[in-house]
Amino acid sequence: MTCLPQVSLTPAQMHDRAIRRALTAAAFFAALATTTPAYPAALRSEAILTGADVRLSDLFDDAGPQANRILGPGPAPGGRIVVESAQLAAIARQFGVAWRPSGPADRAVLERPGRALPRDLVQAALRTALEDTGIHSTDTEMDIAAYTPPILAPDATPEIAVEQFDHDRDSGRFSAVLAITAHGSPQNRLRVTGKAVEMADAVVATRRLTPGETIGAGDLRIGRIRASLLRDGALRRADQGLGMTVRHSIPAGQPVPTAELARPVMVARGATVMMQLETPGLALSGQAQALDAGGIGERIRVLNPSSRAVLEAEVIGPDRVRVSRESAPILPPNRGGTPVASAPPPRAYAQFSDSAIR
């Protein structure tokens, strides 16, 4: 005895086979039934189904009093079936429809409309599952990989239940199993994968910033970036970086670390600066030599050429510094080579005593 090979069928093929069997059964019983009065009719070679069942009126126009008779299940939403000539003839005889095939090429193609399950509905269900893991979904950027949506009846309202959800917070990768039910459609189980990455607002560069550049108003903006890229010390407000110079290159779209910024140099090392000493009701000025470079608001060392005292001063403008009378001078290096702080020597502010009162 020869064994026939087993052939596995897809769910759609099994569904179509069941429909064909139902229609063949109708033809079989038509051969056993007594002939009923026939009604002249025309074959509908193409028909759009409005429901889940195939009716006599879907195959023939003017099918008579049994036009609304259900013949069997229709295809799934978005599917189609073909009723061949022999089946059509048997169905016509059973239900008294006056139609005969003109040849084997006669057939009826039945299509059932459908619509794809919208991606945003799936994402909404996944975001709810993400919330259950403790992650704020509104701060998350989600992408579903290779989304193949199930097809539903056009007027169906789907319900989506997340049966399984696994998410790796470090990589952002997730996988989930969804159960999808909708009236007039078979239940679907959909497995989806993708990435759900936590996002954060941050100050980012609008273009590539190169070393030595001074940041202008259009160079920074607030952008959404991956939270993992945001490090401690990054700028929180765009105005914090205005007027600053860049130490190292910062790519466009990347957060701006404060450590990579410096104030513009207002005083160069070794430059002659105007040193100001201000006391209540009195302002004195004199020249000094900058021992350090600095920007606005930074404190540098300056040398009073008259007293040879080293003072700490605040940079207040281009080649301008300010010292306080209460500030203790830093004496010239001792024999160990290290500057030390001390009480002001008698001539620490000698040059000021010779300066004009402003």
Image (cartoon, rainbow, N blue to C red):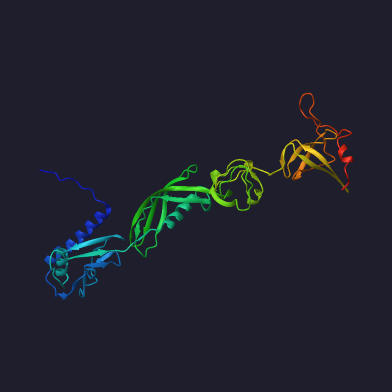
Residue 334 found in image quarter? top right
- Relative side of 241 to 2, left or right: right
Near-viewer residue (98 or 71): 98
Q: Quadrant of the N terminus?
A: top left
Count of numbered labels shown in the rendering: 0
Near-viewer residue (219 or 79): 219
Residue 39 found in image quarter? bottom left
- Relative side of 317 to 165, left or right: right
**Position of residue 310 measured from the top left corner of the image (x, y, whole percent):** 80, 34
**Position of residue 80 measured from the top left corner of the image (x, y, whole percent):** 26, 61
Residue 158 found in image quarter? bottom left
Q: Which residue is situated farthest in the top direction here? A: 335
**Position of residue 214 measured from the top left corner of the image (x, y, whole percent):** 64, 47
Give me the residue at 26% from left, 51% from top: 10
Near-viewer residue (224 or 268): 268
Near-viewer residue (130 or 37): 130
**Position of residue 135 measured from the top left corner of the image (x, y, whole percent):** 52, 48
- Relative side of 21 to 247, left or right: left
| 339 is higher (above) or lower (below) than 210 | above
| 291 is higher (above) or lower (below) than 167 | above
- Relative side of 161 to 198, left or right: left
